[in-house]
Image (cartoon, coloured by chain):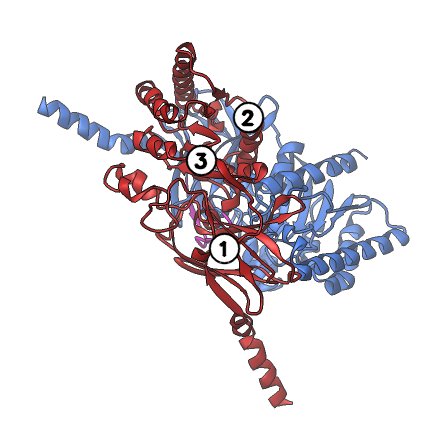
Chain colours: A blue, B red
């Protein structure tokens, strides 16, 4: 009896190791990466080319090491999907979950749409997480979103030892004519609860089209070299959402030149501008309210002057209804929760769809 | 010239201290506290009475030190609202923001509804945060929500030195016949981005009625002494949302007794039961799907037997539509993001309204 209990105890204690031992890990480098504007990066999971290392301002360069908007595509018939990854900085922010900041997020293709499977929750700089288990052993298409506010040094995907993993069989999301977004901390994904809920990732799923996220927290200051990088992409649409960072002076000074860099290389590509959100605390903080007003005057004024000069295929999205009417969609007045991210996608997605059809 | 620059520099460097010096702090103990079932607690910002210290299971007792659902009411004409607070444990979770876990959240009464002002974001165990500034100096009613997954040892509210602060002038939210919720980690507020977005707090604002949150993460195991505490409250409605934690065996064994403790003292008070949510990863994890099914069979079976025995004023809320249809409303398949919290409130709030009217 006592012996049986001991054997049972040993089995129980060894179960996690036993299960883990049954998994086989594959370097994610073997599978396609979505969401990059350029191939020439120091490491794989980065957003700006090496050539900008000594060109871009230091904060922009450092933020480009964050893997916001990047995703790995693979397919597998495994009953379990696990991951091992090492973050670059092990960042922590008080208004964002560690899962959004430096975690992973898995989706799969079900009945013609991308569906959330589960998140890979981080425990530190070096992480190991089983994302999902107990699935039926059927072949599925997967998309694994990378951290929004940290970098990824290494990443591997674990599956049942006897299961298969391979490059995607279906060309989804569509990779020709991706949509390129430029913007701020919000656009980089602040403060989605998990990577898949950054609004660019939501919109990418809804359109089933690749999106390139060039959001740089606090640093969407209309740096021209970013426009140059964007112009290298044969985009379906460019979305410029820089107003929360750029001052009205910077908008008057740099917006047209930034626009011209894109327009000169892409005479017909739709370019969408987006107003500063009406941040929820602006109802109370009069200084913020005045600033929003001033910046939105600036962006609309430059936009109108472009129109007057005969520029075509340019669009302005008003922020009036961006965050809804209940005031609840941010964590700190500024940064969008998943609720705010969904509302932004509800506003912006139909406009992109419309201009893509033209 | 050089002297001018030095003076300017000193002024600039001292500005935060200067501004801070203009604030005067008041102990929050001077103002009414909402959301408590009982007055007899060791410290003010706790949820179970001293008498349970050696009665309740250790994890339940420890979780009762978390200030989930508690809120301070005050009114002030200050242009700035700041806070100083010390947390009990300085908790950190990888699927929740530190602001939700151990931060504060300020709302104010605007045009007949509670409106989010801004959050108090924590920096460590001891915190100081300006929540809002640059307001017009008008008298406003405020509600300050306390941390969801940590305790509060001390709390004070800072206002302009010359401004006034006082107990509320209006008796909102309504304190008679509060609604008492019993439940799990989700009910305790996991994983709202900020305290005000726990669904019990959302529902309290929508109904403008006091709610008592007795959510105990991982520990809604139908402990009878919690029912005893709940029965001490002359509630408008009791909401029992324990299924995510209790096993089907525990439901069969303890649910009716737990119910009888409430019903014996409150023969006519509506009592609402809520099914286990259809956790979003149950679409893939077959073990979870079977467990949800089994538990919901159990809760509905006991509910039916109560009905058969002639019990009145009992209600069951189906979880079928709780999380919406897009699979996006959780951070980890289980815990609700702000999106999930809003959807839960959309489902549960109308039922409470209806039974309150009866």
Q: Distance between the residues labelled 2 and 1?
A: 34 Å
Q: Residue B187 carries which label?
A: 3
Sequence order check: which comes first, mark 3 or mark 2? 3
On whether residue A94 falls in the magenta region, the answer is yes
Locate residue A275 relative to residue B104 in the image: left or right.
right
Host chain of mark 1: B
Locate residue A36 relative to residue B230 in the image: left or right.
right
Q: Do labels 2 and 1 share a chain?
A: yes
Locate residue B222 relative to residue A51 in the image: left or right.
left
> Which of these two is toward me, B102 or B7?
B102
Closer to the observer: label 2 or label 1? 2
> Which of these two is toward me, B33 or A236?
B33
Q: Distance between the residues labelled 3 and 2?
A: 17 Å
Disc 2: which residue: B351
**x 51%, y 32%: residue:** A74
Host chain of mark 3: B
Look at the image and tell me in which quarter the N terminus of chain A lies: top left
Quadrant of the rendered image containing residue B242: top left
Question: Residue B205 placed where, x, y %?
Answer: 56, 40
Q: Is mark 2 on a helix, strand or loop?
A: helix
* Label 2 crowd (10 A; few <14 / some 14-19 / many >=20): some
**x 64%, y 37%: residue:** A204
Could you tell me if the residues under marks 1 and 3 are in contact, i.e. CB atoms within 8 Å? no
Sequence order check: which comes first, mark 1 or mark 3? 1
* Label 3 crowd (10 A; few <14 / some 14-19 / many >=20): many
Closer to the observer: label 3 or label 2? 2
> Which of these two is toward me, A175 or B96?
B96
Disc 1: which residue: B121
Residue extent of the magenta highlight: A84-96
């Amino acid at each position: 009896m006592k012996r049986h209990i001991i054997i049972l105890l040993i089995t129980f204690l060894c179960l996690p190791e036993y299960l883990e031992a049954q998994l086989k890990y594959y370097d994610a480098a073997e599978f396609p990466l979505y969401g990059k504007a350029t191939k020439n990066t120091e490491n794989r999971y980065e957003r700006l080319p090496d050539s900008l290392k000594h060109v871009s301002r230091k904060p922009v360069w450092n933020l480009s090491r964050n893997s916001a908007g990047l995703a790995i595509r693979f397919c597998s018939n495994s009953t379990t999907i696990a991951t091992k990854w090492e973050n670059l900085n092990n960042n922590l922010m008080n208004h964002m979950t560690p899962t959004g900041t430096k975690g992973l997020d898995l989706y799969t293709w079900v009945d013609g749409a991308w569906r959330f499977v589960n998140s890979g929750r981080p425990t530190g700089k070096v992480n190991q997480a089983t994302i999902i288990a107990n699935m039926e052993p059927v072949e599925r298409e997967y998309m694994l979103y990378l951290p929004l506010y940290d970098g990824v040094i290494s990443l591997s995907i674990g599956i049942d030892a006897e299961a298969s993993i391979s490059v995607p069989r279906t060309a989804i999301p569509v990779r020709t004519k991706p949509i390129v977004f430029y913007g701020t901390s919000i656009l980089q994904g602040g403060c989605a609860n998990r990577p898949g809920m950054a609004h660019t990732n939501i919109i990418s799923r809804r359109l089933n089209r690749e999106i390139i996220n060039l959001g740089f927290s606090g640093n969407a200051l209309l740096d021209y070299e970013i426009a140059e990088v964007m112009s290298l992409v044969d985009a379906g649409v460019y979305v410029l959402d820089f107003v929360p960072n750029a001052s009205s002076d910077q908008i008057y000074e740099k917006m047209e030149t930034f626009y011209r860099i894109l327009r000169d290389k892409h005479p017909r590509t739709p370019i969408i501008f987006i107003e500063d959100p009406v941040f929820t605390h602006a109802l109370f903080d009069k200084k913020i309210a005045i600033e929003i007003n001033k910046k939105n005057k600036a962006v609309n004024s430059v936009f109108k002057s472009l129109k007057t000069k005969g520029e075509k295929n340019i669009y302005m999205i008003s922020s009036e209804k961006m965050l809804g009417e209940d005031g609840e969609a941010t964590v700190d007045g500024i940064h969008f929760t998943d609720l705010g991210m969904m509302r932004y996608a509800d506003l912006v997605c139909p406009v992109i769809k419309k201009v893509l059809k033209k």
